[in-house]
Image (cartoon, rainbow, N blue to C red):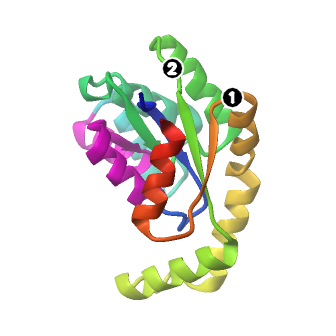
C-alpha cells in the first residue's frame, strides 16, 4: 500500500508542485503548501491567520511558531485525516522537529519524504524557461542561484534528517513528468 502522509522535498524547479498535483489525483489526499495554508488562515480570519497577516503585511517572514500553528489548523481539517502531501514545509530542521511534535500530537506520523534530485544547471534552465513563459522578470539567473544557495543552506539538511528517521526516498527528478511520477509512485509504494 502506498504511503499517504508525505513530504515532497527538493530545490526550486525540481517539480514538487507538479508531482504533488499528480499524487493528489492518484491518492485522493490534499496537497498542503505553506503559502496556501497561510493565505487560507488569513482569509478565514483564524487567530493564527490574523497573527500571520500582521507579519505578511509588514513584509516580514512569518515566524516558525506561527507557521506551525497554521500547519496544525490545516492538518486537523477532515480532508487531511486520511493523508496529506506537504509541499514547501518544513523548510528547516527546526520546522521538521516542530512538525514531528505536531504529528505526534495528532497521533500520526510522516510515512515518506520524497526528495526530488535534479542537477543545479538543469534547475536553473527550468526556472529561466518558466520565468519566460510566465513573464516573471524577477526570475533571472542571479536570483535563481541565490534561491539555490538558500535551499542548500537551510532546506537541504532535511535530506539527512529524514534519512536518519528512515523515511527518505531519493527520486531522480530528471525526465518527463510521467517518468518522474512513476519513480515517485515506486518510492511511496
The image quarter containing residue 4 is top left
- For residue 160, above or below residue 164: below
Nearest the eye: 112 or 53: 112
Q: Is residue 29 magenta?
A: yes
Q: Which residues are magenta?
A: 16-45
Q: Main secondary structure of the magenta part?
A: helix
- For residue 58, above or below residue 187: below
Q: Residue at x 53, y 28 (%)?
A: 111
The crowding category of the residue bearing disc 2, from other C-alpha atoms within 10 Å (few below 14, some 14 to 19, many at least 20), is some
Drawn side of residue 88 relative to residue 153, left or right: left
Drawn side of residue 56 relative to residue 113, left or right: left
Q: Which residue is mark 1?
A: 166
Nearest the eye: 118 or 66: 118
Instruction: Tell me where residue 24 appears, x and y as whole percent.
Output: 31, 45
Instruction: Tell me where residue 161 appears, x and y as whole percent.
Output: 73, 35
The image quarter containing residue 44 is top left
Q: Which residue is mark 2?
A: 103
Taking the image as drawn, is residue 112 in sight? yes
Q: Pointers 2 and 1 in contact (CB under 8 A)?
A: no
Nearest the eye: 17 or 27: 27
Amino acid at each position: 500500500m502506498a504511503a499517504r502522509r508525505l513530504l515532497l522535498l527538493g530545490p526550486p524547479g525540481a517539480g514538487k508542485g507538479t508531482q504533488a498535483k499528480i499524487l493528489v489525483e492518484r491518492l485522493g489526499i490534499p496537497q498542503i503548501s505553506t503559502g496556501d495554508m497561510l493565505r487560507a488562515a488569513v482569509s478565514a480570519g483564524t487567530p493564527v491567520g490574523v497573527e500571520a497577516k500582521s507579519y505578511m503585511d509588514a513584509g516580514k517572514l512569518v515566524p516558525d511558531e506561527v507557521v506551525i500553528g497554521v500547519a496544525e489548523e490545516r492538518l486537523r481539517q477532515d480532508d487531511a485525516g486520511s493523508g496529506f502531501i506537504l509541499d514547501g514545509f518544513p523548510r528547516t530542521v527546526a520546522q521538521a522537529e516542530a512538525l514531528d511534535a505536531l504529528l505526534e500530537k495528532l497521533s500520526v506520523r510522516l510515512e515518506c519524504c520524497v526528495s526530488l534530485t535534479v542537477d543545479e544547471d538543469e534547475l536553473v534552465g527550468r526556472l529561466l524557461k518558466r520565468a519566460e513563459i510566465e513573464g516573471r522578470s524577477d526570475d533571472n539567473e542571479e536570483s535563481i542561484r541565490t534561491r539555490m544557495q538558500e535551499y542548500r543552506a537551510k532546506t537541504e539538511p532535511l535530506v539527512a534528517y529524514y534519512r536518519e528517521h528512515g523515511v527518505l526516498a531519493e527520486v531522480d527528478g530528471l525526465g518527463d513528468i510521467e517518468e518522474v511520477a512513476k519513480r515517485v509512485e515506486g518510492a511511496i509504494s
